[in-house]
Image (cartoon, helix red, strand yellow):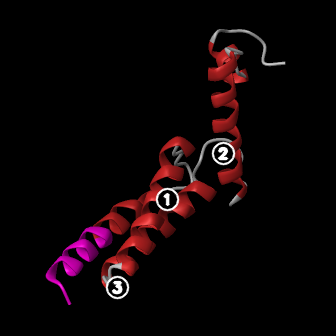
Amino acid sequence: MMWQDLVFLAGSILSIVFLAPTVRDVTANVPLGSSVPSMTIGTIYAVTYATMGMRFSAFGSLGVATMWSLIVCYRSPGPRDGPANVLRFVRSLARQAHSAVTGTPTDDDRVAAGQSAD
């Protein structure tokens, strides 16, 4: 075992401890734009560590990804639809990309400008 494996595990455990209050707080509202990428990065790190033989680091990163997954599902603003929030985030990104390419304002742009989002 490499000592670095234990260092990364310790960092992951700290992340889990620091994320636990957010998961427990029913009034918490963490934007999907922060939580979905964090969940994705945690998952990618877990897979990467596993392929490098760093099992403890992989386990810790999987724990962090799980915490972010819970935040995505149950602590995002708007409807708390569980895993469907990931799809809501992806659709929002697609709308924003389309708007950026075509120059068409999104509903969010209209609301920010004080217009009706009809």
**SS for tag 1?**
helix
Residue 77 pos. (x, y %): 61, 42
Quarter residue 45 falls in: bottom left
Type of amino acid at the residue the image marks with label 2:
Val
Q: Identify the image quadrant of residue 54.
A: bottom left
Q: Which residue is mark 3?
A: 55
Q: CA distance from mark 2 to mark 1?
A: 14 Å
Q: Specify the farthest residue to the left.
A: 3
Q: Which residue is mark 1?
A: 39
Mark 3: give few (<14), some (14-19) or many (20+) Cα within 10 Å.
Answer: some
Q: Residue visible at 31% across and 73% down?
A: 13
Q: Position of residue 20 (x, y in %)?
A: 42, 65
Residue receiving disc 2: 90
Q: Secondary structure at mark 2?
A: helix
Q: Are marks 2 and 1 in contact (CB under 8 Å)?
A: no
- What quarter of the picture does the N terminus occupy? bottom left
Q: Nearer the viewer, residue 2 or 32?
A: 2
